[in-house]
Every structure is written in structure tokens, then in C-alpha cells.
Image: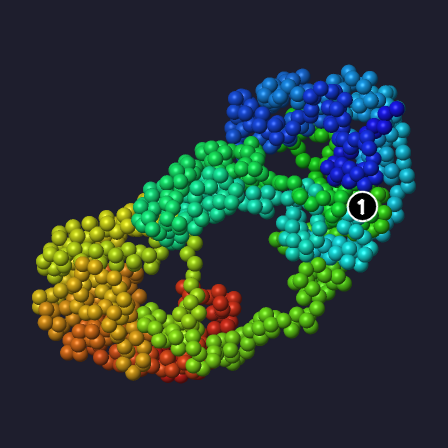
Amino acid sequence: MSLRRTIVVHTTLAARTLRAGAARESAHGLQVLTMEQLAARLAGGFIQPIDREVLQDAVKAALASTQLGELDEIKSLPGMVRAAVDTLEKVWRAGFDLAANGGQPRLAALAALEREVLHRLPESMKRPAELVALAKARLRHAPHVLGPVEMHGHSEMSPCWRPLLSALAHVVPVVWQAGPRSVPDWLNAMHIRVERRDAENPQVDLFSCATPQHEVLEALRWARALIASGSARPEEIAIASASPAAFDDPMLALAREAELPICFVHGVKALTRRDGQTVAALADVLVKGISQERVRRLFALLHEHSPALARLVRGWERVLGADAALTTVERWRLAFDAVEPDDWPEGRDGSQLVLEILAMLAQGPGAASAAGERLLVGNASALWRRALREGPAEALPVTLAELRLGDDREAAASVVWTSAMALASAPRPYVWLLALNAGRWPRQIAEDRLIPDHVVPIEILDPLPVADADRRDYRTILATTARSVARSFSRRDAEGRLLGRSPLTAGATATYLSRSRTPHHVVTESDRLLARPREFEAQPFAVSSLGCWRDWQRAAITPHDGLVRAAHPRIAATLARPLSASSLRLLLRDPIRFLWKHALCWSQPDYAEEPFVLDAMSFGNLVHGVLETAVNALESGDGLAKASTPQIEAAVDRAAAALAASWEAEQPVPPAVIWQQRLREARDLAVKVLAYPLERLPDQKSWTELPFGMADQVEGRRLPWNVDAPVEIPGTGLRIRGKIDRLDVSSDFSRARVIDYKTGRFVLKQDAILDGGKEVQRCLYALAVKSLLGPDTAVQAALLYPRAKDGEEFVALPDVEPALAELVHAIRHSRTQLESGLALPGIDAADDYNDFAFALPSNAVATYLARKLPLAQERLAEAAAIWEMP
């Protein structure tokens, strides 16, 4: 007598649960199959259902070679493969014959696609109707192949399988284990015994939550409380929703933080795993380009697993400049050419291997298949092939975001996060149902994406609509859950829109849960601190945060406004270093930003890989670079002072060409059209600056970008001073450093002219000298020239605005000495105040271009600075007096 028996389920969760139970009970001879697996098993031989991945490959190939009429325009779009696969599976489950209804153009096109797909499928793979026919022909083997058959967890069945079930009941005992579930009417006409039992009587609660994220938090609090109290084991708990994918992100984040054993029955997003991140990095490089940041990330993820990089030594990327704009293979080659052999880790040059791979990646999406085959292995390779099956290579970032991988956790030993359909087929004693909102549970009936209702009525193509299934699953869960069912809905969505309750909860009274409530049981560390405000208040970061917020609101200067320890060693070390003119401007006009930038060394990251435009600073650097190269070239001849306009134009043209090549190889530049336009602008401004009529000094010699007060490598240039000689501001104890845009000196060093170029628009106030501390460069540079050339040198300091109106371009200080005296006085007081611990916000804190505004309260100009600036000005006293100077 055969001991074989078969249980038929229709979800993965039900199958895993039954198999785990059978293993625990040593139930030998038990088969747990789905209906399509049963049909294939009975059909015999190597017959098998159509595998979805194989079907996707066949559909993708068939779409390229099949004329689809009005669908031709969309067949290459992302999602078309998935839509076609869904439609074919729906047609086959419904038992709808596309070929027999070919009079309609849309159906004729899909029938042609179906024929082409079937031609490409393996002979062993059969559609449901074919499986049923083959299985019915071998029913005589059912007693030995299947034994008695039990249907578990079903409340409905697709029409395609019903004929086989009816025929099977005449050969072997078939029992429909309905339990408290509803039984479909069509079952009454079959010789099948239906076993029923009374519905469970669980405790049923309904909770109103603030948002979907709040729902997830409350569900996990509930699950952890059950486990921690010993009321339930993880395998007795389920959290479900009609469509769980919408809640995956908050569920995954909170589950990891809480360290709860939660199994995602429907799979986890591929991008949450290392293999998913690897293929995402490869897709990013292929679609967006071979920038240094993307390539570094890809190679870092590949290095441990890809045989293609086995010969590449670790740390190879350190030979490259971190800021180098490497966006083409040629730029990568030039960067590698500049690397000395001894600079490579372990002396192993990996440039050829890297360049070989980059040459392939630079081909873009067209090289996706070849790149995947060469660089990816194992699960990453399989995931890459899946993504290419589901859409074009150009859409890889979108396609990958939708792919899922199976969860490694065992569902039979974990809390499950699953769909309502799966839970209805494999009930658990403790259940939380999420998203009982209108439109989410039950979900709305939707037309098929390729066969709309006016072509084939929905009731024919989809005889088991999703809305009916959701209602049926809801009733089943309530009837099969033994202990408790907690239901929840959101009052608002993530964007703040009001949401309605599901009609399934009509008449039930909901318990209102506040997002900020104190829970009876917490799930994460942050949740615990929120539940214990007294304990949270004692945490150092809470004390600091609350104190900071309160201090910001006070009408007084506090430590959170920039009061620091007097004679702080960090400030002393900062002031001991040579400072630039821009640093001193910050010291004068915004001491707290000076502290952040120079004492704490904060800096603003630059995210632009290929900027669309050049910002003002970058354009100014470009113009200064052109001027430096051109003047050096002219000075190597008869000199700038004697050069004619054509000579100046020729020198500038050569300088612009050389600088353009250097920039393109070393840093990000805008697109070609914009870049060439900016180069022309830089060239025109440089010509205007150098051709500007100035008094020629006796036997004049000119320098540009002339360094002082710092060690600077200057090759091939004869300079008027030792560039690392210290330059001190008298009476302040501060040293300065910098680069003078242009210095003209007479041969006997009796006269000198300092020029600071301003490539932006003309913003200087009329008759401005220090302009409230904004304009300190020309004074400081004049001081440096007198210090290095001697006190007897007569120095003129001026600004040159090439964009200003004619006659207003050249703005010289009427008298350097009084301006310098005022500036020294202000700097001395600013240093004294900073050393005494007053690093307060200054007038420039309200600047629109303050790159440290993130460290101030929001809307700081209208609130915080309006309250604090008058107090800061009063405390800074004479150090703030410069703000009012002309």
C-alpha cells in the first residue's frame, strides 16, 4: 500500500510552513505542491510549468521580431516585457484563447506574439491548458504518483485548473480542507469532500495611526511585546497587508534597527543587498558615465568577488587625484601617464587593466550584456541578467529598483511580513493587518495593461478580480486567526494628504494612536528614549540640543552663539598660521564663520562632476590663469608695458588654449558649447585687462599671481622677493599670505602698482575704501609690497573691473597709508576679541552666499540674526566698528 499523499497549496508561505511542519513530524511520503506543479507531476516525463524567467527571455526575443501593430511604438519601452508576461499568464489562467478571437487587431497582435513566444520556449514547458490535458491523459497513475489529495488554504482556484481537479476526484480521494473559509460555488458540482470547521473567535482591534511609517512602527512594537512577554513565539506572529511592497522600506529599516527576526515572504528589494548594490553601481557607470566617483565605487564593490579584477592590486585608486575630473577614457589615460611607476601600490601598475575595463564601460548601455558577463559572478550576474530581461539597458536604474531577491530567513521560524493572500493560506495565531485604507484594501480593479476592458471584458479575462480576492482574504484571516487580530489604518499619507478608512472596517471603533505617544513597549533604542523623556533628557546629546535651541531663542549672547574659551589653543594655532585676505575678511565681518572654516576646518563639498555652468569663483580662476600665462609669456620678451594690442591678443589666445587643455584634463568643465563660450569670455576679459591704458612705470616689470608669505614652487620665473619671507601686519601679530593678481614695479623699486582683478559685476560703492571690511585685499597687498620691497617704495593699490562701464574700470585708493591704518586697527581689535572668546556672528552671516548657513537656525536672517546681531555688535565693540566704515 502506497504511503504517498499530496497537499496542494497556492502560496510560497503555505508551502514553506507545511514542509517545515512535515519535517518536524517526520511525515514521509508527503508532497507539498501547487496546482501547476501537481499537473506537471502527473503529466510525467520532463514536463514542467512555464518558468517566469524563461518566459521573460522568450517574450523579450519575440517582441523584437514580431509585428504588433499599434503596440509597436511601445514594445521597446521599459516595462513592456513585464506587461506582456503578465498578460499572457492572465490569459492562460483564464483559459482565454487568443487565436480563436483573432478578429480584433489587438488580440491578433497578441496571438502572434504568443505563437512566437511558444516557439521559443523549451518543449518541456507547457501552458496550463496543455498541462491539464496531459495530466488528464495519465490519470490512471494518480494513485501511485499523488495518492490522496488534500487542498489546503484555498478559497478559490483559477478556472484553468478546475477541470483537472474534477477529473482527479474520480481517481483518488480529494478533500477540500476549507476550515472556516468560504467555499466556491463551482465546487458543489464535483465529487470532492469539503471539510469545514467553525471560525476562530480572536480578539479584534482597530487602530488609527498617523502615517504608514507610524503603522509599521506600531506593528513592530506589538510584535516585540508579544515575543518579549512570552505570549507568542516569532513563528506564531504575522504582519500583513494587501500590497506589502509599499511598506517595505520602513519595515526593513525598523526591523534591522530592532533586530527582530522578520522574514519578507515576498522577497526583499535587490538594492538592499550587496549584490544589488554591485549591479546598481555597474548600471550607474554604464548609463551616467565613467566618472571617477562612480568607477571607484564599482571597483570597490567588485574587488572581492570579480575574477576580472583579480590582477588589480588593492589601493590602486590612491595614485589618482581625488578631485581629478576623469570622465573619459582619454582623461583616465592622461592621469595614469602622470603616475610614476614607484607610486603604484606594491609597484604593480594596474593602469592597463583599468583602462581596458573602462573602454568597455565607456560604450554605455550598449555594452551592458558584455560588461555583466565579464565583471559579475554568482548572484550579481543572475540579477544583472534578470534586469536585462525585464527592460532595455538604458532603463537599468529603474528596472533594478523593482527587482527582488528571496529572503534568507526561514519563514517557519520567524515573524512573517507578507501579503494578505499568503497569510490567508497559512494562518497564524497573532496577526497585525496594515493599511486598511480606502483604495488600499480592497484594492481597485484595474484593466490589463495590454488588453483593456473594451477589447475583452474584465470578468472574462480576470474572473478572480483583485478586489474580490482582497475581501475574501480579509474575511479568511479574521476567521482563521486563533488569538488576536490587530488592524490599522493611516490618517494621512507620507505627503500629508488625508486618507479614508477601508469599507471593510465599517462600524468598528478605532483607537486613536498619536505618533508621539508613550508606548507600553518599545522596539528600538530611539523608540525607548522617546518613551522615557526623563532618561532622554539626561543624555548628553539631548542636553546639548535642548540647551542650544533655548540659547538661540534668548535675547542674550550665549555659548551656542559663539562664546568660546578665552585663549583657546585651537584659535591660537589658527592665528599663528599665515592668513589670506579672504580669511581676514571673515575675521572682520563674521568671526563665527572664521572659527568654523579655519579653526574647525569645515569645508563645503563639491558634488558637481560635470557642471552645467562655471560658477563665479571658477570663472574668476579661469581668467586669472589666462592672465598669468599671458603675462609670463609677454614678460619673457619685451615686457607687458611695451606690448601692442595684437601682441597681447596673441599671447592671450595661446594662454587660453593651453589653460583649456589643462582644465579639461584635471577638473570638471561644462558641456562643450557652454565651455567654449566661457573660454571666449575669459579671453575677451583678459585682453581688456592687459590692454587697459595705465601709466607706464620707468623700465616697468610686471608679474601676475605673485605669491608672498608662503612656500610656493616657482620655476622659471625671476621674482622681486623671496616668496616665503614672512609678512606681518604691524601691531597685530598676524602674518599674511596670498597671491597678488598683478604687480608692476619700476626698475629702481621706487614705485610699485598693485592691481586686484575683479571679474564679476561692479559692486563697489562710490568712494569706498574698506567698504565695511569687504574690500581688504588691495590694502593688505600694498602692505605686503612695502614690507618686501622696502618702506621707501611708493605703492599704488587699485581694483580693475573689466566689466564696468568705460571710465569706471580702474578704482585706486586715494591714499594707502590712512586706509591701512584703519584696517590694522580693526584687525587688532578683531584678534583681541576672538582670543577673548568672542567668536560671534557678524554682519556677513546674513549673506545670501554664506556656505555655512546650515549651522545656523532655519530662517536665521528673519529670526535668529535679527535678535542676535545687535547684541553681537555691542559685545564686539571696536572690532565691529569697521562694518560702518566707507
- Pick whichever, 355 or 846, lies toward us: 355
Residue 526 picture quarter: bottom right
**Is 764 on the left-hand or right-hand side of 793?**
right
Structural crowding at the residue carrying mark 1, measured as other residues with C-alpha within 10 Å and reported as few (<14), some (14–19) or many (≥20): many
Q: Residue at x 76, y 34 (%)?
A: 10
Task: List x then y, in percent, for residue 652.
Answer: 19, 53
**In this picture, is 424 found above or below 792?**
above
Position of the C terminus by quadrant: bottom left
| Three-letter code for the amino acid on which mark 1 is drawn | Arg
Task: List x then y, in percent, for residue 717.
Answer: 18, 61
Q: Which residue is mark 1?
A: 428
Task: List x then y, in percent, for residue 305.
Answer: 52, 42
Residue 750 picture quarter: bottom left
- Pick whichever, 692 or 663, lies toward us: 663
Residue 544 picture quarter: bottom right
**Is 135 on the left-hand or right-hand side of 802?**
right
